[in-house]
Image (cartoon, grey):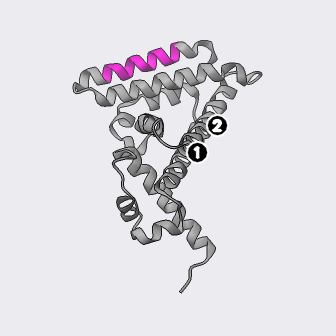
Amino acid sequence: MRYGKEHKQATRQRIIEVAGRRLKRDGIDGSGVATLMADAGLTNGAFYAHFDSKEDLVANAVAEQLHEQRQSFSAQPVEQIVRAYLSVQHRDNPEDGCASAALLDEIGRSTDCTKRAYTDGLLAVIDDIAARLVPDDPQSARVKTLSVFALMAGTLQLSRALAGRQLADEILEQGIQNALALLGDEH
């Protein structure tokens, strides 16, 4: 029995969503097609009905993760975004968090397709925030917003890498203070 177009699209979306969580938890290189498909409750054979390659899936998963981040950020004040991003909860649950903090190093070594999906998705997030910071001239806040985001992603990555929980928590708190100070009057 053949499935309809809606079923195929729903299955594809399920694969993208579970892949996004797995990729953020185990990394791109640490997540094979077999594991990603098993997470979606499907066999390896079904993979190529939905994607041309693992890189195709990775690019789609990264784009979807950034789209979800953009939606979640749109409902929050900027200060709340900073505090939630640099929270212990976010640090300790990478599979539920930001694709940037979890995957930047691997995205940097990925194909142009994945880099383009990441760039497009990230700039959409950044441009939304910049438009809230400086509604009359969002372009003027774009680079500053990107810089603050880079500070936040790096702070989160460093906090995840440290062995001492107290120092890791202090790094998060200082990151919040630094990000808010850089945003200054604009937040």
Q: Residue at x 77, y 22 (%)?
A: 136
Say what amino acid the circle numbered 1 marks. Answer: His
User: Residue 7: image x %, image y %?
Assistant: 57, 72
Spatial CA distance of label 1 from label 2 is 8 Å
Please tell me the numbered disc located at residue 133: none
The residue pinned by badge 1 equals: 67
> Which residue is the extreme one toward the left?
164
Q: Residue at x 53, y 54 (%)?
A: 56
Q: Describe the element under mark 1 as helix, strand or loop.
A: helix
Mark 2 falls on what kind of element? helix
Q: Residue furthest bottom?
A: 1
Q: Quadrant of the C terminus?
A: top right
Q: In the rendered structure, which disc, 1 or 2, sits on the residue that comes first in sequence? A: 1
Q: Which residues are magenta?
A: 169-181
Q: Residues within 10 Å of mark 2 (few under 14, many from 20)?
A: some
Q: Dot 2 corresponds to which residue?
A: 124
Q: Is residue 174 magenta?
A: yes
Residue at the spot 22% in from the left edge and 27% down from the top edge: 163
Main secondary structure found in the magenta portion = helix
- In the image, residue 127 above or below residue 56: above
Circle 1 packing at 10 Å, graded few (<14), some (14-19), many (20+), is: some
Q: Amino acid at mark 2?
A: Ala
- Could you tell me residue 108's position as x and y percent? 47, 35
Splitting the image into 4 quarters, where does residue 97 fall? top left
Image position, residue 144 (x, y; %): 60, 19
Name the spot of residue 2 as percent of width and height, x first. 56, 83
Circles 1, 2 touching at the beta carbon (< 8 Å) = yes
| Residue 187 visible, this angle | no
**Is residue 156 shown left or right of residue 140?**
left
In the picture shown, does residue 132 fall above or below 8?
above
Magenta span contains residue 14: no
Residue at the extreme right of the image, as rendered: 136
